[in-house]
Image (cartoon, grey):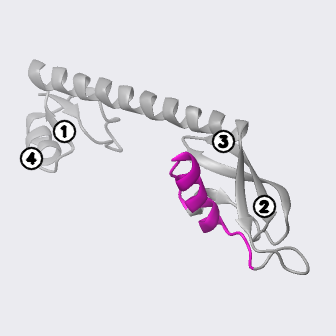
Amino acid sequence: MRVLLIKDVKSLGKAGEIKEVKDGYGQNFLINKGFAKLATPEVVKEWEEQKAKQEAELKAEIEKLNNYKEKIEKETLKIEREKAPVGIRGSVTNRNIEEELKNQWGIEVSHKDINLKKAIKTEGLHEIDIKLGHGIHAILKVDVEGV
């Protein structure tokens, strides 16, 4: 019996591979547990189409992230805070940066992906590392101005 593996099976192979297995093992374990499908031409064609669609979506997402990276590294994000005798009143946190990125440039990044070691408490230009996903990092320049 020929089966198309849908999930990785430790002793057999990886997802997407077509394997020849005994009828009982294929029917009673692999197909029943959802690890494989019977390798008919229609199932194989559907699997290949689905894989091509996923690759195209991944490519589009990576292209979008690279565009975000270019915009982030090219421009400077301006954040205004009330002045204090020393520095600014309050601080600028990664959540503030997340909101400003969304409001000013329309870029949605989770505050968890903004690598801010400690909150910004002074005026001036600060550089911050942002993880965009798929191994793509950008250096954001934040200009904190006291008003």
Q: Residues within 10 Å of mark 1 (few under 14, many from 20)?
A: many
For residue 69, side relative to residue 36 (left or right)? right
Secondary structure under badge 2? Answer: strand
Q: CA distance from mark 3 to mark 2?
A: 16 Å
Q: Is residue 20 visible?
A: yes
Q: CA distance from mark 4 to mark 2?
A: 64 Å
Q: Quick one: label 3 or label 2, which is nearer the N terminus?
A: 3
Secondary structure under badge 1? Answer: strand
Q: Residue 42 versus residue 110: which sits nearer the camera? A: 110
Q: CA distance from mark 4 to mark 1?
A: 11 Å
What's the residue at 36%, 44% (across, down)? 10
Labelled pair 4, 2 in contact (Cβ < 8 Å): no
Q: Which residue type does callout 2 highlight?
A: Val
Q: CA distance from mark 2 to mark 1?
A: 56 Å
Q: Residue 40 versus residue 56: which sits nearer the camera? A: 56
Where does label 4 land, which residue?
A: 28
Q: Residues within 10 Å of mark 2 (few under 14, many from 20)?
A: many
The numbered disc on residue 72 is 3
The numbered disc on residue 144 is 2
Q: Quick one: label 2 or label 1, which is nearer the N terminus?
A: 1
What's the residue at 14%, 35% (across, down)? 37
Rendered location of residue 111, percent (x, y): 57, 62
The numbered disc on residue 36 is 1
Q: Which residues are magenta?
A: 90-110
Labelled pair 4, 1 in contact (Cβ < 8 Å): no
The numbered disc on residue 107 is none
Q: Which residue type does callout 4 highlight?
A: Asn
Rendered location of residue 85, percent (x, y): 90, 81
